[in-house]
Image: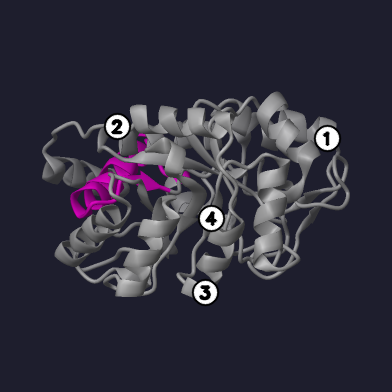
Amino acid sequence: MALTLSPLIFGCEGISLTASERAFFSDSQPFGFILFARNLEHPAQVQAICADLRAAVGWHAPIMIDQEGGRVSRMGAPHWYEFLPALEHAAQANSERLFWLRGRLIAENLYSSGIDANCAPLGDIAGPDTHEVLQNRCYGSDKESVIIHARALEAGMRHGGVASVLKHIPGHGRASLDSHLALPLVAAHHADLRTTDFDVFRRLNDIGMGMTAHLVFQDIDPIAPATHSKPMIDVIRNEIGFDGLLMTDDISMNALQGHLAERAQKAWAVGCDLVLHCNGNLQDMCSLASVAPQPTAQTLRRIAQVIANQPKPVPVDIQQLKEEFDALMNE
């Protein structure tokens, strides 16, 4: 099975698969899928599309989502829990417990709907210049708070059967631009980054999957964003010590230059394991599939580790946990 996989993660267009999508996924065999609000109506429908995606590739492929809570929430009321932005939780008393409960409640919604991986936690440190697209999504404005809260959220999600994708490696907090729209430049010295932003990810480096940041760290590679930079991937792998399955942030974001296929090929060439494509455009996905290499031995090893380490949910009284969460929020 692993030998046939393409090093890609794809989205889809709507609330059910078209015949063309089903045939394409069967042929291209992406490692996994990602869902967005356009794909989600109610729990039974989400369960159905997850089942159809897995049927198309013929195995229990990972299906992920960006369900951070707060502004980045693909699933919302009335069917699923909603949360304040993470930075507001970080300021609460009992914040570590709140983040564990937040993770466990998010996982309950995801796992029961067929989704088994979440693009969280965030290891980015909120600073005075952090762009507003990220600022209140962060788990704190100091290194130790971010580490504690990221650990707690990851543990809560794992308790609920959902694997984590750690983002945005090696740290997006110093970016003053939105990488969806433009390429942020970080001027901080490598020595300073090593003891702050990078150290967060070093201390979280045992999380099985991670996502790159589309930004330039000028003191290390003055030209290429981390997703396309061999020196930055070396920092991620060697200095930070992240040996998990490394995917790009969305390859379509405007921080990156070149045609879509070129962007993907650059990411694979410098050492990213997987390329993430989110918008569900079939023509774009065909273009990426046509240039996808065979996964390297290292990538296949990391994929095998992710599959082997997929968590199983621990039964709980979820209503009791929700009541505890609400009580802590009202203290």
Label disc, if present, on residue 276 of the rendered structure: 4
Q: Residue at coordinates 21% horizontally, 54% vertically from top-left?
A: 113
Please report the bounds of the magenta region as a residue range.
Answer: 90-118
Q: Which residue is nearer to you in this view: 1 or 228?
A: 1
Kind of residue sitting beneath label 3: Gln
Badge 3 marks a residue whose secondary structure is helix
Distance from label 1 to label 3 (Cα)?
40 Å
Above or below residue 201? Residue 185 is below
In the picture, the quarter occupied by the N terminus is: top left
Q: Position of residue 216 (x, y in %)?
A: 79, 51
- Of the numbered discs 1 and 3, the one sitting upstream in the chain is 1
Label disc, if present, on residue 283 of the rendered structure: 3
- Of the numbered discs 2 and 3, the one sitting upstream in the chain is 3
Distance from label 4 to label 1 (Cα)?
27 Å
Q: Residue at coordinates 73% horizontally, 42% vertically from top-left?
A: 270
Above or below residue 4? Residue 155 is above
Q: Which residue is nearer to you in this view: 322 or 232?
A: 232
Q: Which residue is mark 1?
A: 190
Q: Position of residue 306 (x, y in %)?
A: 41, 32
Distance from label 4 to label 2 (Cα)?
22 Å
| CB-based contact (under 8 Å), mark 4 and mark 2 | no
Above or below residue 99? Residue 213 is below
